[in-house]
Image (cartoon, grey):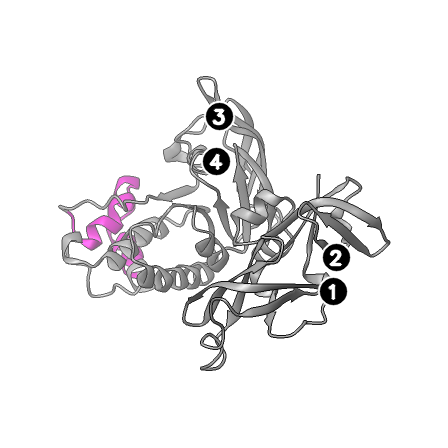
Amino acid sequence: MTDGKSPILSVRHLSKAFGSTAVLADVNLDVPRGSIIALLGASGSGKTTLLQALAGLVSPDAGSITIDGRDMGGVPAHDRPVNMMFQSYALFPHLTVSGNVSYGLSARGTPRAEREHLVAWALELVRLEGLGARRPDQLSGGQRQRVALARCLVMKPAVLLLDEPMAALDRRLRADVQKELKSIQRKVGATFVLVTHDQDEAMAMADFIAVMEKGRIVQFGPPREVYERPNSTFVASFLGTINLFAGVARAEEPSRVRLAADDGLEVVAERSASSGANPICAIGVRPEKVLVARQPTGLANDFAGAIEQVSYGGTASDVTVRLAGGRSLEATVANSTASAAAALQAGDAVHVGFPAPAGIVFSE
């Protein structure tokens, strides 16, 4: 029995090596019931191996996996309360849409009447009602993706595992499907564990992000927390763009850090509770926190420079400013007016600045 508040999925001290290469190294993870978790990392970070271990497709060398209160030790893949949606969708080309969706139910021995009811429910859920008689080659990429999703959801798994489910979709369709997947997840109250290397996808879909590096989860939390307060320069650089000032703290103040950057600049940031007691090694600031102005900004951090490049991106423009000492600083300027991007040209003398609270402090 579960109390509805305990994690639906718990991983404890999970390790896996292939030969002499450690792919998972003491992984610990609690997945709240009814949430979407994104396992985010570069190729080789261990995210897919972790997903496969949850599915029972890979046997860990050490550690435990508990799903819905049940220890998965020794439980084969077909007996686990999970279902897995693969990157390729793996639809059977010789079966109709209804045949693909009902395949698992048939294998389970579900009575025909119940099977037809569940298939109709799943197809309506993914907005494919009326297409049950078609075959996969008669569908668009987005429709095939929804068939694969319906085939998983019809089995009512405790946890749905998704391995790069939108990698084959174009950018516009991917954005639409992300919203649709999240809407469906909310409707059924299921728990999704999503593997992706796409930071935008993780930020858009997930309730929590687990950033992985070298087989470990190096930070776990809501997208806003992981993005706004990364716990390392690795996480900060992997999840979005960041301007980093490396150096040594030159003044110890109760609420602020003054860093002497390696190139001679002084950078000021607010000291946070997460800064820790270790020596300060860097301060970072996200481009959208950086102000670009013709005159001094009057902010705690203000530097003179010249615009090196402006890249127009529709809703916003990415601006690269070369400071007097040679450092380049990235800023994002919202195109809130027609002249916002056009007013900035390469070679223009400007000031860039950001307030102390916008700075992210990193310790060694």
x and y, in percent, of residue 241 in the image = 53, 54
Alpha carbon distance from label 4 to label 3: 16 Å
Secondary structure at badge 2 equals strand
Task: Kindly identify which residue carries mark 4.
Answer: 45
- Helix, strand or loop under label 1: loop
Q: Which residue is mark 2?
A: 268
Instruction: Name the amino acid type tagged 3.
Output: Pro
Q: Callout 2, which amino acid? A: Val
Prevailing secondary structure of the magenta residues: helix
Q: Which residue is mark 3?
A: 60
The answer to whether 192 appears left or right of 106 in the picture is right
Left or right? Give the position of 76 relative to 251.
left
Which label lies toward us, 4 or 3?
4
Q: Earlier in the sequence, mark 4 or mark 3?
A: 4
Q: Is residue 248 left or right of residue 71?
A: right
Q: Which quadrant, please, contains the C terminus?
A: top right
Q: Which quadrant of the figure has residue 246?
A: top right
Q: Which residues are magenta?
A: 95-120
Nearer the viewer's eye, disc 3 or disc 2? 2
Mark 1 or 2 closer to N-term? 2
Lower sequence index among marks 3 and 2:
3
Q: Position of residue 294 (x, y in %)?
A: 60, 74
What numbered label is drawn on residue 300?
Answer: 1
Estimate the x, y position of residue 165 in percent, counting from the top left: 35, 49
> For the residues marked 1 and 3, what is the alpha-carbon distance in whole angstroms?
50 Å
**Amino acid marked by disc 1:** Ala
